[in-house]
Amino acid sequence: SQTIHQWPATLVQPVGSPLSLECTVEGTSNPNLYWYRQAAGRGLQLLFYSVGIGQISSEVPQNLSASRPQDRQFILSSKKLLLSDSGFYLCAWVAGGGADTQYFGPGTRLTVL
Amino acid sequence: QQQVKQSPQSLIVQKGGISIINCAYENTAFDYFPWYQQFPGKGPALLIAIRPDVSEKKEGRFTISFNKSAKQFSLHIMDSQPGDSATYFCAARRAGNQFYFGTGTSLTVIP
């Protein structure tokens, strides 16, 4: 069965510090991978998506970046966090080969102080 | 620009009542319309989904109604229960597996 992991679950970071959030998927090959951000009480904002290793599309220009070093690993990074980067970060995946369903991970709660 | 517009923002329903959440879209290239349920502190979970060649899909107490000509779709929760209290998101997908989400509806079912 397929499983998606995200870590850490919660993170408190000072403004200006770097960020690295990791997402891994098990039980599937060549998935489409996504990073979303959800501000408190708000909807889901698509940040990045990837259709394959090293292939990253950015939906919103900002101080975040994403990388996909392995087929089932997706990393969200920042060199210097801003207060506005606080939020709930969700990784999601869709199985390769034309599948429909998008599955979400448990999320990382990031607070920038 | 919001690709998928969702209403209402919040909804309070009595136990046993019907909860209705509406979404509208403009892009006719969308080909798959899922609904997600999210509890506080958790990731969204797929609830039910529909393709535009079907006007209605029912799974248990949850029904999606789809109006292709009006570019609208809605979620109906029959016999709403306190355990249904959560935030609900509609979404639409276009080719390339790009998903666009509504802004969410916070549903509260009171006993």
Image: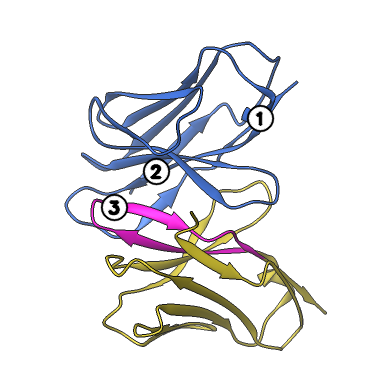
The residue depicted at 39 percent of the width and 43 percent of the height is A3
Q: Name the residue under label 3.
A: B97
Q: For label 2, count other residues whose C-alpha is less than 10 Å away and answer few (under 14), some (14-19) or many (20+).
A: few
When asked about the image quadrant of residue A83, the answer is top right
Residue B5 is situated, as x and y percent measured from the top left of the image, at 53, 66
The residue depicted at 52 percent of the width and 12 percent of the height is A79
Q: How many marks?
A: 3
B13, above or below A66, in the image: below
- Disc 2 vs disc 3: Cβ atoms closer than 8 Å? no
Q: For label 1, count other residues whose C-alpha is less than 10 Å away and answer few (under 14), some (14-19) or many (20+).
A: few
Most extreme residue toward the left is A97
When asked about the image quadrant of residue A54, the answer is top left
Q: Say which of marks 1 and 2 sits in front.
A: 1
Q: Mark 3 lies on which chain?
A: B
The residue depicted at 26 percent of the width and 49 percent of the height is A95
Q: Mark 1 points at which residue?
A: A84
Residue A71 is situated, as x and y percent measured from the top left of the image, at 25, 30
Give the amino acid at mark 1.
Ser
Give the amino acid at mark 2.
Thr
Q: Say which of marks 1 and 3 sits in front.
A: 1
Q: Distance between the residues labelled 1 and 3?
A: 28 Å
Chain A shade in the render: blue
Q: Mark 1 lies on which chain?
A: A
Q: Any magenta on residue A96?
A: no
Q: Say which of marks 2 and 3 sits in front.
A: 3
Q: Name the residue under label 2.
A: A3
Q: Give the range drawn in magenta.
A: B88-105
Letter of the chain shown yellow in the rendering: B
